[in-house]
Image (spheres, rainbow, N blue to C red):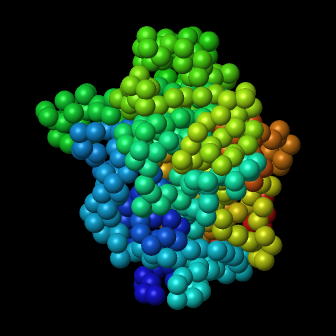
Amino acid sequence: MPVPTNSVSGCDVDVLIVGAGLSGIGAACHLRSESPRRTFLLFEGREDLGGTWDLFRYPGIRSDSDMHTLGYSFKPWTDEKSIADGPSILSYLRQTVAEHEIASHIRYSHRVTHASWSSERSYWSITAETPAGTVTLTAAFVFMCAGYYSYVAGHSPAFEGRESFSGQIIHPQDWPEDLAYAGKRVVVIGSGATAVTIVPAMATSASHVTMLQRSPTWVVSRPDRDRVANALRRVLPPTLAYRITRFKNTLLQQVFYKRSRAKPAKMREALLARLAKDLGTESQDQLVNFTPSYDPWDQRLCLVTNGDLFEAMKQGRVAVVTDHIERFDASGIQLASGDHLEADLIITATGLELVTLGEVAFDLDGVPIDFGDTWTYKGFAYSGVPNLASVFGYVNASWTLRADLIASYVCRLLNHLEATGTSVATPRLRASDRSMPARPWIDEFTPTYMTRAMDRFPRQGDREPWVNPHDYRHDRRIFLKEPLDDGVMAFDSSGEAAQG
């Protein structure tokens, strides 16, 4: 495996990026432009780039936020549709790789399994599994961009009688390329972003689709084209038009979120009024199936593009049912209410399995790291863990907004290490920080797939920099403007005392 030469650190590579999806490709581009002396590689466990956008192949796969904010800060999104389908996003990523000459840095089918920090040598020893066997290398810095969920399998609850169903049961994460569903009766279990995407897409050829949910989710309809963005692009250079649109959409996202948190009753009223209009007079009795018990933004709002779900309901091709599953049987699903859903095909859009740092086993000098015992530093690093950064995007806005900021901060950090003749950056708790009350890493956000995994993630405290607020304005300040040497991030050359 060819590796870069002339690394600043003297390791095989200065920076190892794990993951070649949106975050990893963006990180590589930031390194090339903002820290150009650093050598780097991207290890991707799959056979191609794209991450989420290569893995998921279910009908209708698309972004759940606009591409002017899900796209990179440095590469304008110029398509007419701002809510993009999976193939269009993959094309955008391939263009980015080509334009920034990243392809030669990517090693596919390299699944990182272990990373061990040596305080004596001040570097990470990385182990990766490949089709040809195990590969090892040393890296001064590890940048985890592998996403937040397991690529091995999605979340599949145990359903009584599952084995008795005579048809197929498919999880969206394992979608077969040749799945035939034209003319079939389909039940989609779930009410999240995946379900509201799959249901109207499958309804175009299935005989009927039922979305079966335990409880309603907040959904909002919006067009897949941004008229302002398209108008600006006709009269302004693409980069300027993109920046204006990105600013507009980011601001609107944050205003909507903050109003939802400050005045949940008024936001609930506004969303229900909009839903009533979307459903139309033909489906007013369905409003109960779109009225959650929780407040807006206690969980992420789901996007319905162009009202396609509601249109399919009006045409009788889709039904939404709120009930509990008693059991599967040969012909479908028996519900707790006594009703029965006939099905030829069942789709379990039941969510993801969250993982920490790409399911890689980390250790410090041979001692395994339990990230649940650490404190988050600015939401991207971990107390007592040297030369390690990770990307977790926003729960209340587009993922890439935060990925861009973190990548720029990492470049600042690397440049600072070189400028000061140091090699190790470690967030360390101050004496006054050790008595902080602990809060979940993601607070006041309650989807089940998050809450069941929070014990594996670092804690956050009640003061900076040990907080993770998911606030874009706040993050722009701390990542782009605040001093690197803040009395918490320790810089040295030995890597000693790397305990928080």
- Given residues 397 and 63, the one toward you in this image is 63
Residue 383 seen in this snapshot: no
- Given residues 471 and 307, the one toward you in this image is 307
Give me the residue at 44% from left, 50% from top.
181
- For the image, the number of numbered tags is 0
* Residue 474 percent across, percent down from the top left: 55, 35
The reply, left or right, for residue 163 in relation to residue 29 is right
Residue 166 seen in this snapshot: yes
384 w.r.t. 230: above or below: below
Give me the residue at 51% from left, 17% from top.
271
The reply, left or right, for residue 273 in relation to residue 385 is left
* Residue 493 percent across, percent down from the top left: 64, 72
15 w.r.t. 182: above or below: below
Q: Quadrant of the C terminus?
A: bottom right
- Specify the farthest residue to the left: 235
Give me the residue at 53% from left, 35% from top.
210
358 w.r.t. 456: above or below: below
Instruction: Choose top left, top right, bottom left or bottom right for residue 163.
Output: bottom right
Give me the residue at 62% from left, 80% from top.
127
- Specify the farthest residue to the right: 435
* Residue 217 percent across, percent down from the top left: 59, 29
Instruction: Choose top left, top right, bottom left or bottom right for residue 237.
Output: top left
The reply, left or right, for residue 456 in relation to residue 317 is right
- Given residues 186 and 141, the one toward you in this image is 186
- Given residues 256 and 385, the one toward you in this image is 256
* Residue 346 percent across, percent down from the top left: 57, 47
The reply, left or right, for residue 44 in relation to residue 92 is right
